[in-house]
């Protein structure tokens, strides 16, 4: 009995080592992105290197790499307008919760060609899969609302797939550049690197980076959240002073 148990443990260890035979070094050029008053977007560089096998030998064969970048989750509502009584009114709607506010997939080749379809579905590596996972409730056509959400997020440059976005500078060293638009949300972003060989993921690693407001914009944002009453009173006082000053100037 003990001998069989030992053989089973050794077999599991061997299969686990074969499935994850590579190690990976992965990093980002800018761990923190600051948003200021004239922020118009930012480009960060992600890079990594495929390390030797567990036995110390250099990796053999060719590899592909897929980067997946996710922004902080949010809640979005998509509404469909229809003409009622001669005016356009909201009709059906769909609620999406836990939706990535930013989702980008970059790869060294077409994902369908370098990764098995079962793994693509299991990992939910498409924008449509993110919409399907986040859909909470709807009063209309599910597929229509999911497609419309992806279209709106793509038009806002928040969802995108780049199948030639990863470049190899050597057989094992790879890099990519990710463009963050001016409307990029604040919060913690997760960048994940997947190393693919023969349709299977043989190594992966994740790295976080932060997008946050800086300067006076950050002060206003934190004040609105931490001290909402004082922030509201200050806004009212500022509006009164501005109105009074405008009246004085125009009276002259």
Image: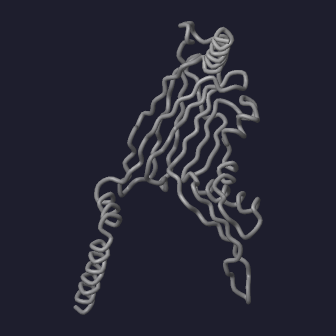
- Residue 250: give x, y in percent of width and height: 27, 89
**Where on the picture, by quarter, is residue 15?**
top right
The residue furthest bottom is 251
- Residue 67: give x, y in percent of width and height: 58, 35
Q: Is residue 62 above or below residue 39?
A: above
- Residue 180: give x, y in percent of width and height: 50, 47
Of the pair 247 and 133, the residue shown nearer to us: 133
Of the pair 60 and 45, the residue shown nearer to us: 60
Q: Residue at x 55, y 12 (%)?
A: 54
Q: Coloring scheme of the render?
A: one colour
Q: Is residue 157 above or below residue 247?
A: above
Q: Is residue 251 above or below residue 107?
A: below
Q: Is residue 202 above or below residue 6?
A: below
- Residue 103: give x, y in percent of width and height: 58, 47
The quadrant of the picture occupied by the N terminus is: top right
**Where on the picture, by quarter, is residue 66?**
top right
Q: Residue at x 53, y 7 (%)?
A: 56
The residue furthest front is 1
The quadrant of the picture occupied by the C terminus is: bottom left
Q: Residue at x 52, y 21 (%)?
A: 49
């Amino acid at each position: 009995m003990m001998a069989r148990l030992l053989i089973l443990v050794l077999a599991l260890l061997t299969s686990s080592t074969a499935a994850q035979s590579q190690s990976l070094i992965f990093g980002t050029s800018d761990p923190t992105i600051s948003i200021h008053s004239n922020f118009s977007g930012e480009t960060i560089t992600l890079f990594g290197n495929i390390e030797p096998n567990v036995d110390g030998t250099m990796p053999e064969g060719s590899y592909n790499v897929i980067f997946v970048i996710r922004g902080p989750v949010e809640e979005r509502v998509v509404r469909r307008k229809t003409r009622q009584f001669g005016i356009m009114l909201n009709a059906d709607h769909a609620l999406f919760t836990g939706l990535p506010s930013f989702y980008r997939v970059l790869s060294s080749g077409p994902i369908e060609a370098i990764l098995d379809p079962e793994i693509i579905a299991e990992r939910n590596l498409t924008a449509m899969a993110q919409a399907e996972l986040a859909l909470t409730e709807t009063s209309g056509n599910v597929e229509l609302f999911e497609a419309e959400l992806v279209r709106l997020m793509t038009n806002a440059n928040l969802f995108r797939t780049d199948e030639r976005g990863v470049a190899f500078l050597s057989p094992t060293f790879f890099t990519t550049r990710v463009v963050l638009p001016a409307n990029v949300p604040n919060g913690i972003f997760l960048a994940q690197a997947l190393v693919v060989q023969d349709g299977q993921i043989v190594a992966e690693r994740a790295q976080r980076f932060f997008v946050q407001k800086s300067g006076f914009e950050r002060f206003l944002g934190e004040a609105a959240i931490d001290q909402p009453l004082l922030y509201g009173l200050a806004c009212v006082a500022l509006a009164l002073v501005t109105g009074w000053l405008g009246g004085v100037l125009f009276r002259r």
